[in-house]
Image: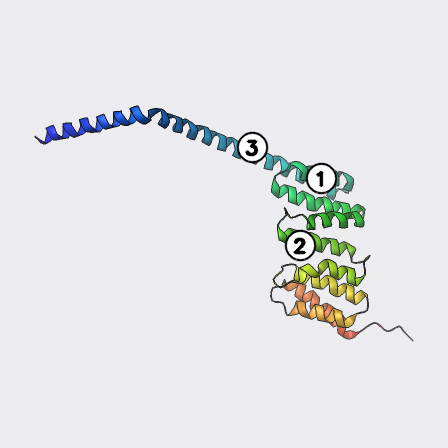
Amino acid sequence: MADIFREIEDDVRRDKAADVWKKHGPLLVGLAVLIVLATAGWRAWVYYEDKRAEDAGARFEAAIEASRSGDTAKAEQDFAAIAKDAPAGYERLARFREAAENARIDPAKGIKAYEVLATDTAQPQILRDLARLRAALLAVDSEPHDALKTRLDPLLAAGNPWGPNARELLGLAALNAGDYEGAGKLFDAIIVDRNAPPSLRQRADLLLGLVRSGPVKPAS
């Protein structure tokens, strides 16, 4: 008797499966085809992106080698080309390296390149701030202290990772301008900043020693 009931249940299941296939078979086949196509497309896209990254990496290394060998013009040209069509990571690296090569040829041109990066809202804020710091570093010998402070003020906000570097640069500019009191305050702020890198705090301590010793008096 149990075997008979089992056979009946099997027949019912087969009938239900047949009905489901009749109603939804084409849809299920279509979904299966879409899944296969989507998987194949995804793998093709991953391969394409990997290949782009590999090619960009090789081009980036070649541009760095040109820079190391002293061929600044070629390095600048190569980094500019990479920045136009490379994946996002290499595009960012290439734009910063292009700006650095510009600065080696002409500091004013380098400043402009970094200023473009600093105002590019497509870049992460930390990189925009780094570009602002690099521009200020190039401008430290050519701009008055007030202009340099205007450049670096946005980096002095609490929690900005480039704040200690900005204070060091402003402190050096103040020291060069003979503002020993202002320089001392900036170096003090670095020393007590627990988030500042240890090496930067050590430099600030050494510079603070120069501040405390006062200006060098001419020999009588």
Cα separation between marks 1 and 3: 22 Å
Using a 10 Å C-alpha cutoff, classify the residue at mark 1 as few (fewer than 14 neighbours), some (14 to 19) or many (20 or more): some
Could you say whether the residue bearing mark 2 is in a helix, strand or loop?
A: helix
154 relative to 88, above or below: below
Residue at position x 70%, y 42% from top?
Answer: 64
Could you say whether the residue bearing mark 3 is in a helix, strand or loop?
A: helix
Q: Where is residue 69 in the image (x, y as percent from the top left)?
A: 75, 42
In the picture, the quarter occupied by the C terminus is bottom right
Could you say whether the residue bearing mark 1 is in a helix, strand or loop?
A: helix
Cα separation between marks 1 and 2: 21 Å
Cα separation between marks 3 and 2: 32 Å
Name the residue beneath numbered marker 1.
80
Q: Do the residues labelled 1 and 3 touch (CB within 8 Å)?
A: no
31 relative to 220, above or below: above
Q: Where is residue 22 in the image (x, y as percent from the top left)?
A: 29, 23
Q: Nearer the viewer, residue 218 or 1?
A: 1
Residue at position x 28%, y 27% from top?
Answer: 20
220 relative to 137, above or below: below
